[in-house]
């Protein structure tokens, strides 16, 4: 379920679907019930074209495991803003089947130190990891697209290995902006820049 301010007519269902978490955080507890997502084992998800899209979690646990199946549906993606601002989250395991991690998915999760990205992921959106506390990450070769600022403002990021199948680094100067401690950036020969 998703809630929004009952006394504010400017909140449409589509606005709520894209910014669910912000709506709840910014407008307090005066809400009206709107059916939008299903919950299972602390994860919130919707169904799109027969596949599950993870849209959030109950934020009670520092560890998060995103399964390959939920509610008898394959998990296809992690939606925009799914875990944005989650202060509890420290480590994430994503199982095979997830193909994309959308914009702002883990934005401003300051205690997130570990994430396992599976070989099924092909794209990482804008501002997915800024202000996270990840120090090292190796991206699987299945990833072909990494959007601008995907790792920006990751002050603790020291080492990253880019995937062999990355199409290009056109947005390279913004991909890691203000990652002041980045000391080891491994770019495979196959990547154009």
Image: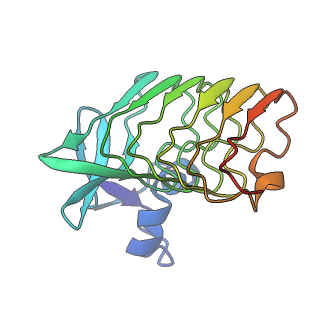
Tell me, yes or no, if residue 152 can be seen here: yes
Quarter of the image for residue 171 reads: bottom right
What residue sits 46% from the left and 52% below the top? 122
Quarter of the image for residue 12 reads: bottom left
Tell me, yes or no, if residue 134 can be seen here: no
On the picture, is 96 further left or further right than 163? left
Using the image, determine if residue 46 lies above or below residue 176: below
Using the image, determine if residue 178 lies above or below residue 124: above
Quarter of the image for residue 68 reads: top left
x and y percentages locating residue 65 in the rendered image: 35, 29
Using the image, determine if residue 157 lies above or below residue 69: above
| Most foreground residue, 56 or 159 | 159
x and y percentages locating residue 178 in the rendered image: 86, 41
x and y percentages locating residue 48 in the rendered image: 26, 65
| Most foreground residue, 13 or 159 | 159
| Most foreground residue, 28 or 116 | 116
What residue sits 56% from the left and 42% below the top? 106
x and y percentages locating residue 10 in the rendered image: 51, 78
């Amino acid at each position: 379920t998703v809630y929004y301010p009952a006394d504010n007519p400017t909140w449409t269902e589509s606005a709520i679907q894209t910014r669910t978490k912000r709506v709840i955080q910014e407008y307090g507890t005066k809400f009206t019930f709107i059916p939008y997502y299903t919950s299972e084992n602390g994860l919130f998800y919707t169904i799109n074209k027969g596949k599950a899209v993870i849209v959030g979690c109950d934020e009670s646990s520092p560890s998060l495991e995103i399964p390959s199946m939920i509610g008898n549906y394959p998990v296809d993606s992690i939606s925009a803003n799914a875990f944005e601002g989650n202060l509890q989250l420290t480590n994430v395991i994503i199982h095979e089947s997830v193909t994309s991690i959308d914009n702002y998915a883990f934005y401003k999760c300051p205690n997130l130190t570990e994430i396992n990205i599976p070989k099924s992921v092909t794209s990482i959106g804008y501002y997915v990891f800024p202000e996270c506390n990840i120090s090292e990450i190796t991206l699987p070769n299945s990833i072909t697209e990494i959007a601008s600022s995907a790792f920006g403002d990751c002050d603790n990021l020291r080492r990253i290995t880019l995937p062999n199948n990355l199409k290009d680094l056109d947005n390279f100067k913004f991909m890691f902006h203000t990652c002041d401690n980045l000391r080891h950036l491994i770019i495979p020969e196959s990547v154009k820049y």
